[in-house]
């Protein structure tokens, strides 16, 4: 007889209240998520503000080209004389010296964001600012055309153009579908015309808002039914240097008055998708806004300064700026800042409840000072606002500990914790919230992802969210990150939704988020699970593999590798010629020295299997970087392929040293980085001591890390139960990350299950994945009429009661 797992839910219990805002989303302009993505503008570099500061190959005319067709001749330059607005200093100067055969002059054509995707029969809003400098070119023609210019899909005339800046607009109805069209502005004759803020927008935006959001991308976010939307960052909020901070007042008002700037992730922000558009989107989808402002400091990774605080004399004005955000969002329409919101078209307050202050900031004295001033001012002037603080970039480590201590000291209501870890880590930490102080700050898990877009990661995230839900009284908010990623323009993997100009691809991870969010409850119910599958123990091995390696795009050489028991003199390791090159290009140089000579690789590894007698030993090597941007990796305790520990020395842009664990090939950090970049041409003595779970790392004889990694057993079969009081439903969620199906006998004591339970299940092989294509599986729904439910391997299942005829307390 097949063994059953019994899940008992006390549906009659009062239960524990769950945060009504638990599952939301986080939008950051990363992976080209805004311009060319969610923001529906089709013209790239519409204000001629691109710069080599954003990207070395860029300039003010990037994405534009001069056209001299049918005999027309002319030129295009960029000027800063008498700009449209100081915040928008550059404009194009289109000069026609000879008219063409049809009397028209030179033209400017825009390539869009990987092309201009248009559809037959749809209407497009065209607008631009123009002024006539000289001549008779006082008419402009805007047209959508094929890439080679042989076909015109639609055109409209703009004008007359006068001697001062004026906005001109028209509508083009497109006569063809083309994912790779172009947008062109043609001068009306001989002369010089100045152009700025040249725009092409589909009228069919989300909720048909002029100048709004791309409908299909916005809809896939709306379908998640998020309880809140966090924005604009993330790292984007505090920026690279004080001058790159995201300052919210510069993102509202007329588009040509918004200050554009370099995106921290290496491209450009037009600020067309600014604070007003964010708040409007939240309202449109029924989500609460959760804006994040800098905590008065820039990103600690800013080169060469590191974290810098806003100057002392500027802090009063900055605090006032933060307070003004609350007035802009919530103040009456006749208040100084509320009137700006009303002028934009929203006289009613937005109803702001949450405000994030800071993101992943190092907990320094400067941070403490700046944060305290902002927090105290908000508490004094707006005690109704729930402030969300920050506890650094990781769920462990010095900044995390200092951040929590500081939050308790300042009585910060909620803190923001981030976790980018392996699937195994998430399964090991489903009980992480059980012992939280119920009287202390609540938790916002503002960024988390299990490091891949496969089913194994998705199920691990589902289990982790079950852990959040079971502790929904103290885990107040949670949002996966990043949200969006555009094909060919990704800076970060994994992501929740992938897209290009015409397609949107939700991932398996997205389906997990959706299933959790649309099946939220208000009360966590007691659950007892008997006979649940348990994690298989990690195979013990008498011998551990070791490796030497290099970081991204780095060349290095190694010599004098030694391995031996702790407390004894280490013996020379086998000659590197006997090690296995797993990746990279390894070339022996004699005298026991070997070089990794390849550029471009993400990581390179030279492995010696079964090299050390566990569990206690030392492994040392001498290493020198010969070129590239990072440093070395020293691997050890490799019990099976893809499962090991490693010491990253000069990793992540050569910023420091970290201990890392690799689970099934997925790397995650065990501690905060310790400062110490790797110098090119210098020899380093690197030594790792393994003593069971304790790991000690030395660089040139100096202790760098001393850590004991003793994780909890993974919860491979996680269960939660909640009550949705408004619907009268009981909802049971089960994440099965094992390789076997599980027969579950479900007992819902005191529940009204009517004619049965609605079952929604997502299942796929563990390594099934999708990014730029349809997901390999989607949730399937059916009705469960009996007490036994089959839970597939590698699956997430939601069972939801539909009240009807009263049944026995036990479904049996």
Image (cartoon, grey):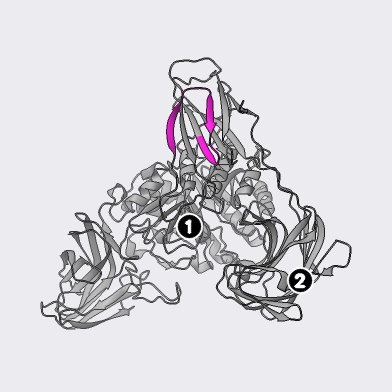
Which residue ends up furthest to the right in the rendered image?
Answer: 568
Relative to 572, say whether 225 is above or below: above
Instruction: Give how far across and how far down residue 364 sits, in percent.
Output: 66, 60
Helix, strand or loop for the magenta stretch, by majority:
strand
- Residue at the image point whose x is 17% and y is 59% from the top: 175
Q: Nearer the viewer, mark 2 or mark 1?
A: 2
Q: Which mark is residue 107?
A: none
Residue 636 falls left or right of residue 668: right
Q: Which residue is mark 2?
A: 621
Q: Is residue 458 visible?
A: yes
- Residue at the image point whose x is 52% and y is 57% from the top: 234
Relative to 25, say whether 581 is above or below: below
Instruction: Give how far across and how far down residue 160 sits, in percent.
Output: 15, 69
Instruction: Give how far across and how far down residue 124 sits, in percent.
Output: 23, 58
Q: Nearer the viewer, residue 381 or 356?
A: 356
Residue 280 falls left or right of residue 768: left
Dividing the image into 4 quarters, which one contains the N terminus?
Answer: top right
Displayed quadrant of residue 9 = top right
Q: Which residues are magenta?
A: 779-797
Q: Is residue 523 visible?
A: no
Element on which disc 1 rests: helix
Dot 2 or dot 1, earlier in sequence: 1
Badge 1: residue crowd in 10 Å (few <14, some 14–19, many ≥20): some
Q: Nearer the viewer, residue 672 or 303?
A: 672
Instruction: Give how far across and how far down residue 88 sits, in percent.
Output: 35, 70
Q: Which residue is mark 1?
A: 321
């Amino acid at each position: 007889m097949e063994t059953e797992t019994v899940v008992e839910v006390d549906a009659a219990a009062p239960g524990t209240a769950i945060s009504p805002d638990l599952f939301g989303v986080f939008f950051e302009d990363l992976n080209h998520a805004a311009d060319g993505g969610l923001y529906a503008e089709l013209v790239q570099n519409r204000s001629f503000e691109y710069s080599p500061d954003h990207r070395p190959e860029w300039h003010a005319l990037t994405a534009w080209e001069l056209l001299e067709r049918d005999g027309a001749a002319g030129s295009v330059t960029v000027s800063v004389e008498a700009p449209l607005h100081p915040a928008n200093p550059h404009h194009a100067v289109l000069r026609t010296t000879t008219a063409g055969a049809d009397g028209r002059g030179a033209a400017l054509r825009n390539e869009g964001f990987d092309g201009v995707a248009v559809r037959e029969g749809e209407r497009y809003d065209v607008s631009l600012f123009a002024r006539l400098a000289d001549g008779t070119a006082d008419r402009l023609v805007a047209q959508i055309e094929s890439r080679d210019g042989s076909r015109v899909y639609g055109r409209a005339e703009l004008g007359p153009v006068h001697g001062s800046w004026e906005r001109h607009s028209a509508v083009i109805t497109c006569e063809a579908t083309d994912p790779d069209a172009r947008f062109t502005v043609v001068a009306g004759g001989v002369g010089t015309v100045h152009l700025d803020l040249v725009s092409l927008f589909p009228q069919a935006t989300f909720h048909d808002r002029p100048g709004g959001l791309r409908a299909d991308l916005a809809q896939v976010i709306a379908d998640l039914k998020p309880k809140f939307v966090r924005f604009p960052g993330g790292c984007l909020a505090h920026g690279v240097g004080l001058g790159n901070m995201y300052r919210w007042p510069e993102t509202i008002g007329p588009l040509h008055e918004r200050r554009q700037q370099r995106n921290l992730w290496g491209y450009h922000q037009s600020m067309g998708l600014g604070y007003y558009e964010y708040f409007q989107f939240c309202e449109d989808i029924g989500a609460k806004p959760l804006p994040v402002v800098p905590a008065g400091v820039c990103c600690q990774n800013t080169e060469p300064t590191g974290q810098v605080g806003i100057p002392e004399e500027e802090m009063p004005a900055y605090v006032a700026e933060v307070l003004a955000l609350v007035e802009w969002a919530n103040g009456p329409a006749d208040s100084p800042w509320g009137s700006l919101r009303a002028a934009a078209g929203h006289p009613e307050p937005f109803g702001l409840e949450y405000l994030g202050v800071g993101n992943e900031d190092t907990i320094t004295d400067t941070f403490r000072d700046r944060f305290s001033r902002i927090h105290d001012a908000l508490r004094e002037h707006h005690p109704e606002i729930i402030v969300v603080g920050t506890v650094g970039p990781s769920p462990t480590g010095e900044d995390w500990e200092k951040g929590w201590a500081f939050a308790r000291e300042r009585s910060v209501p909620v803190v923001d914790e981030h976790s980018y870890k392996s699937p195994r880590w998430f399964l090991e930490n489903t009980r992480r919230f059980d012992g939280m102080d119920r009287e202390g700050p609540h938790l916002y898990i503002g960024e988390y992802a299990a490091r891949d877009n496969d089913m194994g990661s998705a199920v691990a995230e589902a289990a982790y969210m079950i852990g959040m839900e079971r502790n929904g009284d103290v885990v107040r908010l949670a949002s996966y990150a990043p949200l969006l990623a555009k094909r060919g323009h990704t800076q970060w993997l994994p992501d929740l939704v992938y897209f290009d100009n015409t397609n949107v691809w939700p991932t398996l991870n997205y389906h997990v988020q959706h299933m959790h969010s649309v099946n939220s409850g208000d009360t966590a119910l007691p659950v007892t699970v008997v006979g649940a599958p348990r994690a298989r123990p990690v195979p013990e091995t008498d011998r551990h593999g070791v490796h030497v390696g290099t970081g991204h795009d780095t060349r290095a050489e190694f010599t004098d590798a030694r391995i031996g028991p702790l407390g004894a003199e280490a013996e020379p390791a086998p000659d590197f010629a006997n090690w296995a090159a797993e990746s990279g290009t390894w070339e022996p140089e004699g005298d026991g020295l070997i070089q990794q000579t390849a550029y471009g690789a993400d990581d390179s590894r030279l492995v010696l299997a079964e090299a050390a007698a566990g569990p206690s030993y030392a492994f040392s090597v001498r290493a020198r970087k010969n070129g590239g941007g990072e440093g070395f990796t020293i691997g050890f305790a490799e019990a099976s392929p893809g499962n090991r520990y490693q010491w990253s020395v000069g990793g992540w842009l050569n910023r420091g040293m970290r201990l890392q664990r690799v689970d099934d090939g997925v790397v995650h950090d065990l501690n905060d980085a310790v400062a110490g970049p790797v110098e090119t041409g210098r020899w380093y003595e690197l030594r790792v001591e393994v003593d069971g779970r304790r790991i000690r790392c030395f660089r040139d004889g100096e202790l760098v890390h001393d850590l004991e990694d003793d994780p909890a057993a993974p919860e491979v079969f996680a269960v939660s139960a909640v009550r949705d009081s408004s619907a009268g439903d009981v909802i049971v969620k089960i994440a099965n990350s094992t390789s076997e199906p599980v027969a579950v006998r479900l007992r819902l004591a005191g529940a009204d299950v009517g004619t049965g339970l609605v079952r929604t299940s997502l299942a796929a092989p563990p390594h099934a994945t999708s990014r730029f294509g349809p997901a390999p599986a989607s949730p399937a729904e059916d009705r469960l009429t009996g007490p036994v439910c089959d839970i597939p391997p590698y699956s997430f299942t939601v069972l939801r009661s539909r009240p009807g005829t009263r049944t026995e307390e036990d479904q049996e």
